[in-house]
Image (cartoon, coloured by chain):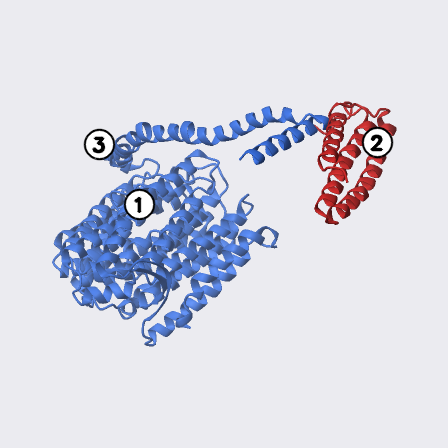
């Protein structure tokens, strides 16, 4: 089966076309095709992972896509443990999202096309994961980007949503420019765009460290955009404008994981370059803390989770930046995070479905109305905050411990502080949403089973996935990677203490007066956080406006007057000339005969003379 | 044996008369008759050259032209009759519906 792994991305791609062309005529409006394709894909992905775990060698097959001079661009499949494990995660979360959407999106006016995009989204991510060459990876990468744009702007009738979609698209594209150049540099330096070929070339010492560093940094630009790292993290919270299952999909499996996956896939390029690793770690450290602090002051429950995702992705980046020992913890966190972050989003979606608002100030006391949602959300929270024995504890603790063991003490300290803030904001979210008394107007009720069953499944996974961390090293092992440090009791006691103190502080702050949010009463600090460090304003005033008004407006004017003018001018000119010429056609046969004879006479004259 | 130039000259006059009739006459029947004049001018030329060159090709052509002319005048007159039935006129200036 592992040799036919390309079927896994092909299934949702086929589903996409089926839904696009025939979805509306199907009894389930296309949803059943998407769900069926994802179910089969998940089963196949599990089989592939099973084959890999039982000791199959990496599979690499490719065909020539196009040739330009000496540059051969190939496409194909490369399956090793990382691919196999990502397959299972992506398929599982995609399937959960599609099942969940049957209830969440019920009666939506663009239900069918929504399912089409969901299928394409999964297909694109699976293509990115299976890609054997950098250019194939780029195709999946950009397809993921366009699908996220379409899904974030699903309810585009409201300007806010379409703005968010455009922002997500343009911000990630900003990162894609260096990414593209990174691909060029690496392809030229290695002489091939095949990822196994590049890995082998680097291992043989065929590429200088300077070139490696340059291409690693350029490629990381794409990862910064896709994985919403500082300073391009601004699109992810706005992307909450999309439907909640899409948010879950974007945050857990298909979109933001792509950046981390990219660094992991090309870790052979990053590992030899100390500067590149330091940069990755530095970006990770900055992002994890600022995003976690931002999560503290959000009122929109989905935005809390969005900043939380940014912060957790930064953990993975920081872990990758710690060197060969940080690789496995990062992958471990990527997998467990997919489970509990999807779970948290489904919980948030369930709450939003019940109370018809995203604002936590209009929630509260939902514990009694929505017991299943409450229980599963609590498990997700515990996992995210790092409470043992849930999944997040093992993976996050491993990241923090690796930071200490590899003497990255700054990363270690920042990660610990972030762990504290993470526990704090998640406690705040749970208390504001589920405890106290209900502050809204709606009549909350438990969600239908199509929504709760994915939540229960993911809650079970979030609870137990942590015990299987030892497998991750076996699965995702690549030559550039070292085995992570063994479990250290002292260090894990410290991180557990940090997590619990965060929960305790949150509980004490919000126990009595959840209505008066203490996080918004910290003076200038709150103002700074509520305004998102003024980064959005700086980008708007410093980047967007200077481009928008002098440049974009002039280009627009040029397009409308000169280019459109030329095109329209051809049309108008043709019409006017035709309007003049039509008077020749008088309907009078004798006049035509005159033209005929004059023409013959002129021709006869010309032929006899010349 | 008459000289070649006489029939050619005669044909030219005949053809010119035909052109004048086609272009200037208002009556559709007369226009059709003028077309016959032009065709017969061509026939005269063909026969004259056939005799001059001692080849039969020209005469055979002339026979074809006469056949086609018969068909043409049949259809033409039928059209004229139909126009007359519909519009009570056979003035070609009046029949100019097929225009912009």
Q: Position of residue A471 (x, y in %)?
A: 29, 69
The CA span between labels 3 and 1 is 20 Å
Q: Residue at x 44, y 68 (%)?
A: A44
At mark 2, the secondary structure is helix
Indicate which label's residue lies in the foreground, 2 or 1.
Answer: 2
Same-chain status of marks 3 and 1: yes
Relative depth, front residue between A204 and A41: A204
> Which numbered dot is residue B80?
2
The CA span between labels 2 and 1 is 88 Å
Q: Position of residue A386 (x, y in %)?
A: 27, 56
Q: Indicate whether A87 appears above or below A370.
A: below
What chain is colored blue?
Answer: A
Q: Position of residue A593 (x, y in %)?
A: 70, 29
Does residue A136 show up?
yes
Q: Is residue A577 left or right of residue A473?
A: right
Q: Position of residue A119 (x, y in %)?
A: 47, 55
Which residue matches tag 1? A307
Which residue matches tag 3? A524
At mark 1, the secondary structure is helix
């Amino acid at each position: 089966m592992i040799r036919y792994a390309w079927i896994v991305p092909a299934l949702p791609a086929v589903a996409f076309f089926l839904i696009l062309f025939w979805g509306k005529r199907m009894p389930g409006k296309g949803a059943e095709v998407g769900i069926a394709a994802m179910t089969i894909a998940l089963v196949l992905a599990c089989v592939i992972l099973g084959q890999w775990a039982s000791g199959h060698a990496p599979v690499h097959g490719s065909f020539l896509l196009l040739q330009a001079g000496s540059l051969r661009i190939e496409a194909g499949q490369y399956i090793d443990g990382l691919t196999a494990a990502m397959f299972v995660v992506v398929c599982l979360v995609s399937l959960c999202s599609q099942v969940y959407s049957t209830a969440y999106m019920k009666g939506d006016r663009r239900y069918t096309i929504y399912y089409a995009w969901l299928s394409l989204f999964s297909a694109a991510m699976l293509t990115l994961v299976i890609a054997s060459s950098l250019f194939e990876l780029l195709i999946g990468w950009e397809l993921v980007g366009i699908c996220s744009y379409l899904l974030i702007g699903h309810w585009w009738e409201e300007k806010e949503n379409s703005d968010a979609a455009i922002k997500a698209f343009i911000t990630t594209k900003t990162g894609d420019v260096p990414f593209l150049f990174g691909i060029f540099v690496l392809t030229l330096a290695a002489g091939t765009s095949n990822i196994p070929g590049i890995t082998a070339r680097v291992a043989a010492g065929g590429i200088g460290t300077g070139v490696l560093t340059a291409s690693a940094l350029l490629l990381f630009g794409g990862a910064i955009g896709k994985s919403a790292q500082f300073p391009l993290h601004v699109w992810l919270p706005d992307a909450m404008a999309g439907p909640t299952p899409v948010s879950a999909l974007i945050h857990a499996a298909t979109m933001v994981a792509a950046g981390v996956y990219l660094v992991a896939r090309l870790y052979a390029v990053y590992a030899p370059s100390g500067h590149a690793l330091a940069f990755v770690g530095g970006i990770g450290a900055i992002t994890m803390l600022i995003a976690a602090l931002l999560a503290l002051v959000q009122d929109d429950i989905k935005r809390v989770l969005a900043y939380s995702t940014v912060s957790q992705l930064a953990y993975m980046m920081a872990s990758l930046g710690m060197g060969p020992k940080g690789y496995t913890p990062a992958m471990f966190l990527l997998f467990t995070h997919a489970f509990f972050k999807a779970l948290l989003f489904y919980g948030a979606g369930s709450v939003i479905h019940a109370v018809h608002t995203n604002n936590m100030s209009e929630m509260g006391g939902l514990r009694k109305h929505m017991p299943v949602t409450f229980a599963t959300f609590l498990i997700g929270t515990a996992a995210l905050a790092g409470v043992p024995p849930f999944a997040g504890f093992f993976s996050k603790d491993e990241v923090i411990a690796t930071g200490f063991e590899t003497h990255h003490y700054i990363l270690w300290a920042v990660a610990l502080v972030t762990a504290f803030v993470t526990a704090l904001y998640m406690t705040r979210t749970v208390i504001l949403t589920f405890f106290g008394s209900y502050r809204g107007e709606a009549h909350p009720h438990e969600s239908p089973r199509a929504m709760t069953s994915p939540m229960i499944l993911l809650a079970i996974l979030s609870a137990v996935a942590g015990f299987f961390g030892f497998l991750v090293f076996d699965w995702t092992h690549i030559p550039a990677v070292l085995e992570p440090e063994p479990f250290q009791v002292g260090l894990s006691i410290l991180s557990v203490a940090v997590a619990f103190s965060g929960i305790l502080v949150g509980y004490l702050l919000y126990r009595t007066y959840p209505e008066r949010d203490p996080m918004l009463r910290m003076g200038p600090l709150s103002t700074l956080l509520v305004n998102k460090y003024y980064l959005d304003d700086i980008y708007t005033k410093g980047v967007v406006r200077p481009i928008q008004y002098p440049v974009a407006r002039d280009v627009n004017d040029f397009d409308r007057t000169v280019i459109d003018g030329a095109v329209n001018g051809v049309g108008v000119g043709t019409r006017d000339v035709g309007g003049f010429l039509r008077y020749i056609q008088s309907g009078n046969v004798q006049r035509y005969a005159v033209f005929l004879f004059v023409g013959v006479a002129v021709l006869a004259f010309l032929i006899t003379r010349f | 044996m008459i000289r070649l130039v006489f029939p050619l000259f005669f044909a030219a006059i005949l053809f010119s008369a035909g052109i004048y009739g086609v272009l200037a006459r208002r009556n559709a029947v007369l226009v059709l008759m003028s077309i016959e004049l032009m065709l017969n001018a061509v026939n005269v030329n063909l026969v004259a050259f056939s005799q001059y060159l001692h080849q039969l090709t020209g005469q055979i052509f002339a026979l074809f032209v006469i056949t086609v002319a018969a068909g043409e005048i049949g259809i033409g007159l039928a059209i004229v009759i139909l126009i007359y039935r519909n519009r009570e006129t056979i003035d070609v200036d009046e029949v100019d519906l097929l225009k912009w």
